[in-house]
Amino acid sequence: MKEGGRKQGAASPCAACKLLRRRCANDCVFAPYFPADEPHKFANVHKVFGASNVNKMLQELPLYQRGDAVSSMVYEANARVRDPVYGCVGAISSLQQQIDLLQTQLALAQAEVVHLRVSQSASLSNHGLSPTSSDSPPPPSKSILDMDFVMDQSTYSDSMWPC
């Protein structure tokens, strides 16, 4: 029978109690969220937040919110271990830069489509044809792949793809 993420009366402590080298009580606040088979999960949380602070945060939350809080702490702790200065903010910033770049590329592609449509329409009207005329094939136009702009990729080097 399982209670709180570990077997009742079992001698195996949760990952938190194992790392802290203490006896794991049946009512251990860490046991449901830091099982013995995932020691790395608590190690990073302990390194970033400290066991006492994690204990206080979990004690102050209702039971139904503790799982989400632990997930958030684990995510932030892992981000802080990878990037001690910026943590999650660094990852968010990198993703925002990617969004900005992609939005710029999309706007340029949309402008090129509009340019091609206007050129095609003007070419058809110069020949006395209506743009919806199906009697003749459309005039040759510049492919959307032959864009008139160059993106400077050097400004988007390593910050684009976080590891």
Image (cartoon, helix red, strand yellow):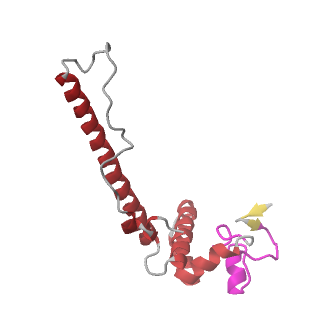
Total tally of numbered discs in the picture: 0
Please state the horizontal and vertical placement of residue 89, each as a whole percent of the image.
Answer: 41, 70
Q: Residue at x 66, y 71 (%)?
A: 34
Whether residue 95 is visible: yes
Rendered view: 147 above or below 159: above
Q: Quadrant of residue 6?
A: bottom right
- The secondary structure that dominates the magenta segment is loop
Q: Quadrant of residue 100?
A: bottom left
Please state the horizontal and vertical placement of residue 63, each as a whole percent of the image.
Answer: 57, 63
Is 86 or 103 nearer to us in this picture? 103
Quick check: 16 left or right of 124? right
The stretch drawn in magenta includes residue 20:
yes
Is 91 or 49 nearer to us in this picture? 91
Name the image quarter holding the N terminus: bottom right
Rendered view: 127 above or below 50: above
Whether residue 58 is visible: no
Quick check: 65 left or right of 114? right
Quick check: 99 left or right of 28? left
Q: Residue at x 56, y 59 (%)?
A: 64
In this picture, which residue range is highlighted in magenta?
7-35
Please state the horizontal and vertical placement of residue 15, each as a whole percent of the image.
Answer: 70, 76
Q: Residue at x 22, y 18 (%)?
A: 130
Is 6 or 72 nearer to us in this picture? 72
Q: Residue at x 57, y 83 (%)?
A: 47
Please state the horizontal and vertical placement of residue 150, each as a whole percent of the image.
Answer: 33, 56
**Most extreme residue toward the top, as rendered?**
135
Is 156 or 131 nearer to us in this picture? 131
The stretch drawn in magenta includes residue 81:
no
**Most extreme residue toward the bottom, as rendered?**
21
Name the image quarter holding the C terminus: bottom right
